[in-house]
Image (tube, rainbow, N blue to C red):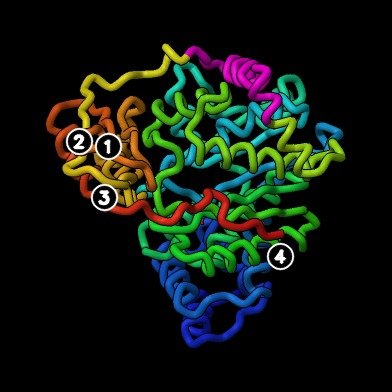
Amino acid sequence: MIRPAELIERKRDGEELAADELRELVLGYARDGVPDYQMAAFLMAVYFRGLSSRETFALTDAMIASGETIDLGAALGRKCVDKHSTGGVGDKTSIAVGPVVAACGVPFGKMSGRGLGHTGGTIDKLEAIPGYRVELTTEEFVEQVREIGLALIGQRADLVPADKRLYALRDVTATVDNVSLIAASIMSKKIAGGADAIVLDVKVGDGAFMKTLDDGRALAETMIELGTRAEREVVCLLTDMDQPLGRAVGNALELREALATIRGAGPPDFTELVLSSVAHLLALSDLGIDEAEGRRRAEQAVADGSAVEAYERWIRAQGGDPAEDALPVAPVKTEVLAERGGFVRSLGAIRIGVAALHLGAGRRAKEDEIDHAVGIVCLKKRGDAVEAAEPLAEIHARGKTAGSEAAEQVAAAYELGDEPPRPRSIVLDVVG
Ligand code: URA
């Protein structure tokens, strides 16, 4: 029987722990045998000392062993692809990627999370749709992927329960942004969820957990190693999170933007990320095509309307109303005007994320209710030319006071200057 205090001490002193020690600690925590205060101390020791590759593998295996696993490929009799983002501001990518992948004839069954801190969660966004059921049984989930080609549900509690508890603890003990802990958290869920091939969107920048390209690359490489060890193919896109993705931040606003994008009328950065993600997913699928052909098919599915049809089939199958008019609308709309003319030099993602959170688009405490209607639309993005008094952004608020407070925060997120910044593409690098 391990003594948690001894493991904390040895990790604090920089020792490498054995796989069975980590396994007992994680399973003990998942089953209430190890208290939060000891696990929190252990996480902080890991935060400062790091985990070796061997320890990261062992942590991931222990997390998978804490619950059930699904073999989606065996249930469908096909190779299954999945995607996951490390989290950012305005990230509605899965909601647009799913219908395009399904329209191209590749099954897409995904489990997603809720918002954390200033980052939004796909499941919160989907709950803006009246009637949408985020909880399906495993049988319903598999059946819907088989019948409709697409299902998107909340993370099942019986899959990697250790992650659910560990993540909540990390969120409140300043131990989220550690490469080994993020890699084990994401990959344990992807491996337990049964994907054969995975596209990971590793966000880098001001609004992401990884602030630099080097840190993003280290996270990508660790996740690829974990995937390879579990015989899964993994490709990581390192993508820009120095400014919000697309224009919309806030649940119903982001859904409208995802819909516009699969209709071919989305913002350029978001459209590029969706098409690029789909191209990689199709190239990893059992279609036997390369990425260039994947890209061509993704563009075709958007142009011929089959992606929108897939979206509507999917939302109806999950009990929701796919009509755009069914989405909630905030009662107060305020514009943020430019104080001067020039170019947008930067647009701080974290400031926009926090302003949306304060409007009610996210949770400050775990038990908070989300207001699905509120949020921010960034009409101008990095590099755009602006005239004095032209609108930079729109605030969608529940009341006037909340709207004007958010307007001040959003104005402070914009840096205007005389020269445009150097253009930067949304996909910064591809690893794997
Ligand atoms: N997303 C996850 O699922 N886990 C992390 O640790 C960070 C982002």
Query: What label sits on residue 105 in the rendered view?
Result: none
Measured in 3D between alpha carbons, the distance from the residue under mark 3 to the one under mark 1, in whole angstroms, is 10 Å
Measured in 3D between alpha carbons, the distance from the residue under mark 4 to the one under mark 3, in whole angstroms, is 42 Å
The answer to which image quadrant residue 130 occupies is top left
- The three-letter amino acid code for the residue at tag 3 is Leu
- The three-letter amino acid code for the residue at tag 1 is Leu
Note whether ligand 1 is within 8 Å of mark 3: no
Q: Mark 3 points at which residue?
A: 416
Q: Give the range drawn in magenta.
A: 299-323
Query: What label sits on residue 392 in the rendered view?
Result: 1
Are the two marked residues, 1 and 2, in contact with CB atoms closer than 8 angstroms? Answer: yes
Q: What element carries label 3?
A: strand
The answer to which image quadrant residue 51 occupies is bottom right
Q: How far across and how far down the image is residue 401, in percent?
A: 12, 32
- The three-letter amino acid code for the residue at tag 2 is Leu
Q: Is mark 2 on a helix, strand or loop?
A: strand
Query: What label sits on residue 225 in the rendered view?
Result: 4
Q: Earlier in the sequence, mark 2 or mark 3?
A: 2
Residue found at x 62% / y 61%: 220
Q: Is residue 187 left or right of residue 30?
A: right
Majority SS type along the magenta span? helix
Q: Name the residue under label 2.
A: 337
Q: How far across and how far down the image is residue 181, in percent?
A: 54, 64
Measured in 3D between alpha carbons, the distance from the residue under mark 2 to the one under mark 3, in whole angstroms, is 12 Å
Q: Relative to 220, does residue 283 appear above or below in the rendering?
A: above
Residue 310 colored in magenta in the image: yes
Residue found at x 63% / y 37%: 275
In front of the other: label 1 or label 4? Answer: 1
